[in-house]
Amino acid sequence: MPILEAHDVYQEYPTRSGPLAVLQGVTLALDKGQAVAVLGPSGSGKSTLLHLFGTLTQPSKGTITVLGKNPSSLPEAGLARFRNNTVGFIFQDHHLLPQCSALENVLIPSLARPASERAGLPERAKMLLQKVGLGDRLDHRPAELSGGERQRTAVCRALIHQPAVVLADEPTGSLDRHAAEGIGDLLLNLCKEEGAVLVCVTHSNDLASRFPTRMELLDGKLKTMV
């Protein structure tokens, strides 16, 4: 059974001149540990695709399943729990809380869980930060970290709950080339170790070239690039 599956997914938005079709029949199935880079011009629907995969929005037509479940069938509270436990998000802007340390920022997603379900998470957060080379920066706040270090912290935060799916939206867009290369390799290696599906939306051909599978979103269609 695929970890993440989209079947004949359409997404439309109402406009004054009629419905605007952003996605038109997207079909995709990804198994444990698979990593895909999605390229495409601005406005092609790449972020829309990630929002659908991340259960933030529902498709106009078609189905998306994660771990064999259709999130659209869940009540709102159940959907929020499912998203928190199953999906990790990484964005171009790290969105770290400036008043919190690196360790505290990594643990923020766990605050949505009951205290009884947080056992072992501080140790996991420290382990992840050590893996990305920040073991000696646990108590540093974002202002004391470089851009690459802040994004590495955001990667750890996305992985804190061992998500089945990791979604990255232009994760290297605000970094210099050296830091961007490090984040790209880090994402691929960590997600492979964790057995997570990784879908990365990017404009960067350099980042996309590091992925085993590259796809292009164009005219609402998702096609594998040779």
Image (tube, grey):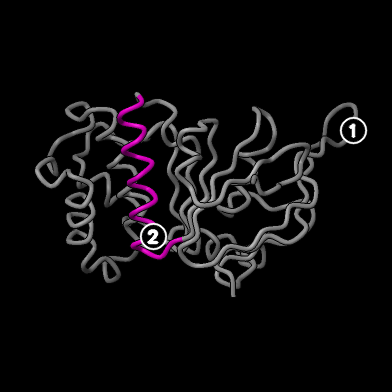
The secondary structure that most of the magenta stretch takes on is helix
Circle nearer the viewer, 2 or 1: 2
Residue 48 pos. (x, y %): 64, 41
| Residue type highlighted by circle 1 | Gly
At label 1, counting other C-alpha atoms closer than 10 Å, the crowd grade (few under 14, some 14-19, many 20 or more) is few
Q: Position of 184 compared to 12: left or right?
A: left
Q: Residue at x 63, y 45 (%)?
A: 215
The residue tagged 2 is 192
- Looking at the rendered structure, the secondary structure element under dot 2 is helix
Residue lying farthest to the front in this orientation:
226
Residue 97 pos. (x, y %): 29, 35
Residue 188 pos. (x, y %): 39, 51
In the image, which residues are magenta? Answer: 177-196
Q: Residue at x 33, y 42 (%)?
A: 154
Q: Position of 40 compared to 94: left or right?
A: right
The picture quadrant where one finds residue 142 is top left
> How far is the residue under mark 2 from the one under mark 1?
43 Å
Establish if 213 lies above or below 64. above
Query: Which mark identifies residue 182?
Result: none
Establish if 111 lies above or below 50. below
Q: Position of 126 compared to 202: left or right?
A: left
Residue lying farthest to the bottom in this orientation:
1
The residue tagged 1 is 18
